[in-house]
Image (cartoon, rainbow, N blue to C red):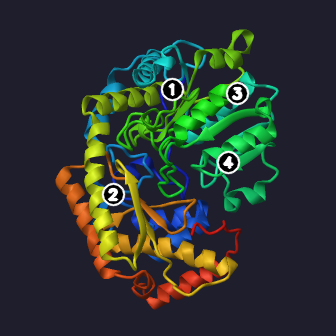
Amino acid sequence: MTTGPATGSLPPGFIRAQDVLDERFSPEQARTLDTRYGNEELLFGLNLLGLAGPFYRVTPWELEDEAGVRRINASGYAAVPFGDMPPVLTAFIREFTEKNRAQTLPQQASSPWRAALQTNLVRLLARELPSHDDSQVFFCSSGTEAIEGALKFAKAWRPRGKFYISFSSGYHGKTLGSLSLTPNPEYQDVFRPLIPGALTSPYGDLDALTRLIRRLGPDNVVAVVVEPIQGEGGVNIPPPGFLRGVGELCRRHGIVCIADEIQTGLGRTGHWFESAAQGLDPDIVTLAKPLGGGMTAVGATIVRHTIYKKMLGGLSSKRHSNTFGGNALAMAVGLKSLEYLIEQDLPARSARLGAVGLERLRALGQQYPRLFEDVRGQGMLLAMQFKPMVGIPLPGVLKELVFEATAILALRELHEARVLANLSLSSKRTVRLTPALDIPEDLFGELLGRVATFAERNPASRHILTNTPPAMTARLAKFAASKPKKRTESDG
């Protein structure tokens, strides 16, 4: 009788976990095999730019490459709220693996970890929006899954409805339902037909939304899905009163209002829930990114009690499910992350430091008007929109390529200034900074100083191109020309 695992060798060519952990698996091997067996085109492009890594943690807020060059991490797309492998979570996870006895995948049983995180999320939301004091939570493993769940909850509540409304420049994910509400032809076109009835209204224009609902007939609208601040759209902040008006319009007609707080929720913008801060009381709130603390994948859909029961009531309680949502490790990390956010009052810290960061970036914008088109931000969600690096008017696809290349090469120049930043998927000339909410103040100041160094080296947007080595520019142009794709309409 076998009492333990086999002790034979791995077949030739296989890679041991211990070799990766002990860093005997080299960066060059990682790049080569990741390119060969993974997203080849993406990694090939990153390699051309010198951005492919891999990177290694020095501190939670700083990463280094194989040459030992240390950079401040302001990337992570708002999913790294405490930096890379933060001690508060790594210590807790070690303790969890030693002490936890609760079932790890409690799909058909009660779970103390899931119960605790559900309770804390609802109590946190109800503290901001008392109407949610009896709401319920459905857990999943990503933001796009949280949106998919929200769409199903809304449809179950309004089964006769035919239309879902989202907003221009919005981003809600890339699975089929969430993609249908992400009006970006580059991501949508090859997958058409998408879900029927997905319509787009101009972001920030309440009158346009009112007219659209009137034209469709309010009873035919299932839901309105809105980001309180558009992240992938380039940190677009709606005009005062817009979100409050969206909520009032939905409530008047019985339309389900879904707030996508995946990027803005839990402190990034300086508020626990940006929708609540702007006067919106949505029926459904979706969360993800910071809830996993940068250590694991957690998504959550928080739903008013009556809507939740409509979809998952009685014998229909398994009408929506997934395998890994609510697993013990994810729930434990989410619980500890939320606890740390609350105890350190990181939303308030984000608001304070973010105001400092925005003021300094705006000063750079005024100092270098030929480089910056605009600077936007709230809390630790900051954006720099650049002028096109080719100043002459260009037609159609060429214009879009120049816009896209402007942000990509700006990302590279920031990399040279030892800053890791984010592109914006729905705003081609915009690069975002999303540093950890607990980044030390002196390091945050250094981050802003390095952005200033980047601007000094590129006082006009054309320098982003001229500072790129010619051989690299030629290889990138050849790569872009060989990979034609549908490009979105210019963002200005």
Instruction: Say which label, 2 or 4, has the lower sequence index.
Output: 2
What is the three-letter code of the residue carrying label 3? His
- Tell me, yes or no, whether the two marked residues, 3 and 1, touch with CB atoms within 8 Å: no
Q: Which residue is mark 3?
A: 253
485, above or below 123, in the image: below
3, above or below 374, in the image: above
Disc 2 from disc 4: Cα separation:
39 Å
Mark 2 or mark 1: which is in front? 2
Task: Check disc 2: other Cα within 10 Å, few if <14, some if 14-19, many if 20+.
Answer: many
Instruction: Say which label, 4 or 3, has the lower sequence index.
Output: 4
As drawn, is 16 to the left or to the right of 195? left
Q: Which residue is mark 4?
A: 208
Disc 2 from disc 1: Cα separation:
29 Å
Question: SS at mark 2?
Answer: strand
Query: Where residue 417 appears, x then y in whole percent?
Result: 30, 72
Query: Quick check: can you spot residue 233?
Result: yes
Disc marking residue 73: 2
Query: Where residue 29 appears, x then y in whole percent?
Result: 46, 65
Image quadrant assignment for residue 305: top right
Instruction: Say which label, 1 or 4, has the lower sequence index.
Output: 4
What is the three-letter code of the residue carrying label 2? Asn
Task: Check disc 1: other Cα within 10 Å, few if <14, some if 14-19, many if 20+.
Answer: many
Mark 3 or mark 1: which is in front? 3
What is the three-letter code of the residue carrying label 4? Ala
Instruction: Say which label, 3 or 1, has the lower sequence index.
Output: 3
Q: Which residue is mark 1?
A: 327
Question: SS at mark 3?
Answer: helix
As drawn, is 432 to the left or to the right of 11? left
